[in-house]
Image (cartoon, grey):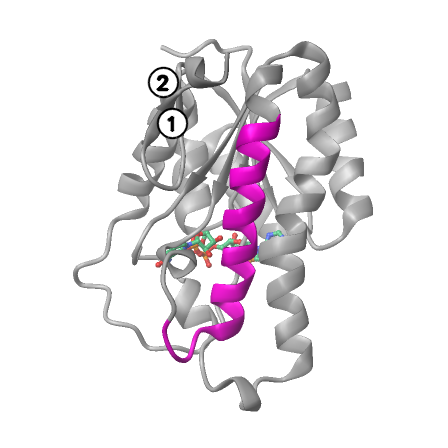
Amino acid sequence: MADKNRVVLVTGATSGIGLATAEKLKTVGYHPVLTGRNPDKVKACAEKLGISGYTLDVSNEEDCARVIKSVENDIGPIWGLVNNAGIWLEGSFEKYKVADIRAVMETNTLGTMFMTHSVLPGMLGRKSGAIINVVSTGALYCRKSISVYSGSKWAIRGFTGCMEVECAPKGVRVMGFYPGKVDTNMYSTAGIDRDLEVAMTPAGAAGMIERMFSDEHILWGQVSGRSINDYA
Ligand SMILES: NC(=O)c1ccc[n+]([C@@H]2O[C@H](COP(=O)([O-])OP(=O)(O)OC[C@H]3O[C@@H](n4cnc5c(N)ncnc54)[C@H](OP(=O)(O)O)[C@@H]3O)[C@@H](O)[C@H]2O)c1
């Protein structure tokens, strides 16, 4: 079992991978904190899992700082962060609405950076912590119709790799999780009908995230697990 004092904040945890991750982390003994942008969903999901929930829109930097501060005051230092909140956008680039381009970049890319920016000083001060960014195979290759989603995730791939190198010598693991298709609402929310018959389950993805947290001497990077001693 994990140390129950290890508080792990999960963003976008009212659905899909985030919700399954909060549930898995609770099952193995962490102290997960569920967050999401819709207060009603946060309340319902947090009550169902029997854990704390906070309303948090990751695209708002003040919200990120406020919620991290509240969680640390109410519950205790945040040991782990799962930057999971994300939205899908698909189609020809010239047909996208500017507001949709902005929303994807602000949620998938800036949201991950804002959350990391707010939580990191505490982790570095304690020389302990782990951050998992839910990236995507969309950040490993290029294909038509996903230009902005892919761009938002390629940015996070670069960010994650640089932060891995920057933070590992200071005792904080920053890792990227790169799933392919997962059977969640992400596509249907974006109005896309996707065949998810061969997709990973949210529980399967959550199990991999939990393994990345628990395997403390490994940095799960974009290519392979790397020993934390590589940075010693
Ligand atoms: N599903 C896949 O095939 C797949 C593959 C690779 C990577 N991913 C990544 O996995 C992550 C989770 O996606 P999912 O598949 O689990 O999708 P999902 O079921 O749609 O869940 C996404 C979650 O993010 C929340 N969210 C959206 N915008 C937010 C914001 N600005 N602030 C806070 N929360 C926000 C959603 O809240 P609401 O319910 O209120 O909208 C929802 O709880 C995303 O980063 C996605 O890019 C997914």
Residue 215 tag number = 2
**Looking at the picture, how far across and down is residue 134, in whole percent?**
46, 45
Up-down relation of residue 156 to residue 78 (above or below): below
Mark 2 residue element: loop
Could you tell me which quadrant the N terminus lies in? top left
State the residue at coordinates (54%, 44%): 44
> Distance of mark 2 from mark 1, alpha carbons?
6 Å
Amino acid type indicated by mark 1? Met
State the residue at coordinates (30%, 58%): 181
Up-down relation of residue 63 to residue 50 (above or below): below
Mark 1 residue element: helix
Q: Which residue is mark 1?
A: 212
Residue 103 shown left or right of residue 46 in the figure: right
Up-down relation of residue 162 to residue 108 (above or below): above
Q: Are marks 2 and 1 in contact (CB under 8 Å)?
A: yes
Give the residues in magenta.
143-166
**Looking at the picture, how far across and down is residue 49, in whole percent?**
46, 32
State the residue at coordinates (26%, 40%): 204
Residue 14 tag number = none
Q: Is residue 95 magenta?
A: no
